[in-house]
Amino acid sequence: MARTKKVRQQQSLFADRMVQFPTTRYQGSKAKLCSWIWDEISHLEFSTCLDAFGGTGSIAYLLKQKGKAVTYNDVLRFNHLFGLALVENKDTRLSSSEIDSILTAQDGVAYPTFVYDTFPDIYYTDDENRWIDQTITIIASIDDPKKRALAFFALAQACIIKRPYNLFHRKNLYVRQADVKRSFGNKTTWDKPFEHWFRVFIDEANRAVFDNGKENRALQLDALDIPGEYDLVYIDTPYIAGSGVGVDYKSFYHFLEGMTDYGEWPEHIDYKSKHRRLIPQKTVWTDKKRIHAAFDELFKRFRKSILVVSYRSDGIPSEEELIELLSRYKSNVQIRHYGQYKYVLSKNSKSKELLLIGT
């Protein structure tokens, strides 16, 4: 009885706070599955937790809402900034005057033109590319790291919403500009100016900032290098399809990753690619030959924690293999099926969302 009462108190701890995770259009985001995931883990007793592959931060933010001490982690720099802005940040916001300053060119300043020069007719119009050059330069000059992260979040979301498919996987500005009937996307959305979307998303981000009374933090490390011990570790690795092809988020969102290090961006571009991607870097998390060993090492590293794994039923490793790996370190492994949840752009209607819980 005492345990049940404790859980109910945690669930209602921030019920009076009007805080909500901002809108995102991120491939693979668990934002729509948050309620289901919380329903499946809310009975577990834990105070500290790690979201080891944080992505947009929707699960880390959920756990923050539930009064947990949260550590967010993601190896990508732009994702780390999302975590810094929305998870670690507890009271920093951008004022109206600061937002206006970000969106206003300073007299006499000659802004760089790297995006304008490098990405013509690829993702955005010339005027939009110039706007990005100007805005990311102004954002980079903000002294406060959390204000800088908030501004970057708004810029990144504005970039995503103006992209067909919400990705940077190919050169396809023409899709936006063609005067044809479409079965997807929203030309009105695409054609609204960047400044409009920046203001929409910075308003959402500002309203999402809150203090849950705990010290939360955002890291940028490979999951196997994360220090510390946690009561619960949530794991949502990049998906490797049964065909052996892994989801490479750095490839999908290379433009956002490049913006985080604007000055060094030119040195990391694959200029042979039509869409000016970043030079590919191999990772164990998208390698079908090494992923089993990586999961085993990760489970071993955090074997003292409750392990919660989000997964898809048709991935590599298979559901059965993942259960076997988890069972090496956990005596009790439970499986929860959400059903046929379909991800955007996924052609596999038979894939089921899984949650494996090892205690």
Image (cartoon, rainbow, N blue to C red):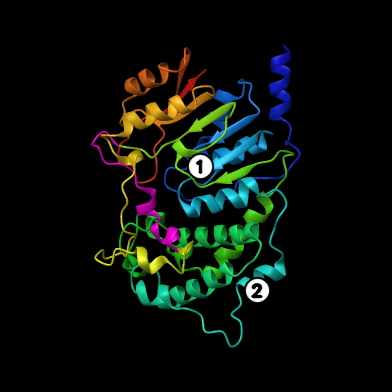
Q: Nearer the viewer, residue 25 or 239?
A: 239
User: Magenta segment, which residues?
Assistant: 241-258
The quadrant in which residue 294 appears is top left
Q: Amino acid at mark 2?
A: Ser
Kindly tell me whether residue 83 is visible in this rendering. yes
Residue at the spot x=73%, y=14% of the render?
2
Give the mark nearer the N terminus: 2 vs 1: 1
Instruction: Determine whether 320 is above or below 16 in the image.
Output: above
Residue identifier under label 1 = 54
Kindly tell me whether residue 350 is visible in this rendering. no
Residue at the spot x=30%, y=31% of the render?
316
Quadrant containing the N terminus in the rendered view: top right
Residue identifier under label 2 = 101
Instruction: Determine whether 202 is above or below 283 in the image.
Output: below
What is the CA distance from the residue labelled 2 to the residue labelled 1?
A: 30 Å
The quadrant in which residue 298 appears is top left
Q: Amino acid at mark 1?
A: Gly
State the SS at label 1: loop
Residue 194 in percent (x, y) is at 52, 68
State the SS at label 2: helix
Residue 266 in percent (x, y) is at 37, 69
The quadrant in which residue 101 appears is bottom right
Residue 243 appears left or right of 128: left
* Residue furthest out toward the bottom: 108
- Binning the other alpha carbons within 10 Å of mark 1 as few (below 14), some (14 to 19) or many (20 upward) gives many
